[in-house]
Amino acid sequence: MHWDYTALAKHYDKRPDYSSAALQTLFDDIGLTAAGSVVDMGAGTGKLTRQLSKTGCKITAVEPNAAMRKIGMYNVQEQNCRWLDARAEETGLPTASFDLVIFGSSFNVVDQHTALQESARLLRPGGSFACLWNHRDLTDDLQQAVEKIILSTLPDYDYGTRRQDQVQVIDASGFFGKVQKHEVRFLREIDALSYMEAWRSHATLARQAGDRFHEVITAIEERIAGLKTIKVPYYTRIWYARKR
């Protein structure tokens, strides 16, 4: 599986942050403290990395795409964070050295079994794996309208594994104990320009739309014409489990 984010990187910062309440629940549940050590897999432009750095933990941000990593290193210059050019399936990091390995909107673009195996290798006894995404609430009227635009152009459009329940794939690896799920709904108010910039970073849509990506983006832009700000409801959904 190959995902190239180079052309999308400059738009990525317009995506919403993850729910701080959802992340705090994760940190509390797994007992993550400022003395901890975390690997942020597929760190991108540092959306999750910056939130992780606020815990005081030592962060290793793993990002194989040079364009994304360059922006991420600029965005997150905290002293407790280092950046690494590597893939989630083979990081080269030391065995049993981390308390949390976490994938923010990136677990769907890797070989999941191999990435889970590598995560288990990196974790200390009692350490935890986690993956999370922000999902738009598709029951919202505007988001339903956007979905109709996408499907009118791409009738077979599929969000893929990023919207699927992750319990089965984590369980099937055999590396982790009981999988927990936590979600928090939140509302993000954003200006119309930033809303469209976020859509221009949508790798799943770009991958499936191909040459028609611009057509879809233009149609969404026409749908929100005249709106200065947009309220977008999201769920931050997290799946996590301790290493066996």
Image (spheres, rainbow, N blue to C red):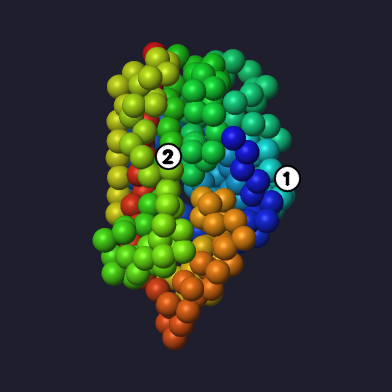
Q: In this view, does 50 lie to the left or right of 27?
A: right
Q: Closer to the observer: label 2 or label 1?
A: 2
Can you give x and y, in whole percent of width and height, for residue 126 in the image? Answer: 41, 17
Decide which of 100, 107 is in the foreground and name it. 107
Instruction: Tell me the amino acid under the disc marked 2.
Output: Thr
Sooner in the amino-acid sequence: mark 2 or mark 1 = 1
- Residue 85 visible? The answer is yes
Can you give x and y, in whole percent of width and height, for residue 185 in the image? Answer: 30, 54
* Mark 1 secondary-structure assignment: helix
Residue drawn at x 73%, y 45% is 66
Residue drawn at x 26%, y 61% is 139
Can you give x and y, in whole percent of width and height, for residue 244 in the image? Answer: 39, 13
Residue 66 image label = 1
Query: Which quadrant of the view contains residue 212?
Result: bottom right
Q: In this view, does 217 lie above or below 125?
A: below
Disc 2, disc 1: CB below 8 Å?
A: no
- Reading the image, the residue beneath label 2 is 161
Residue drawn at x 42%, y 48% is 159
Residue drawn at x 42%, y 52% is 156
> How busy is the neighbourhood of tag 1: few (under 14 within 10 Å), some, or many (20 plus)?
some
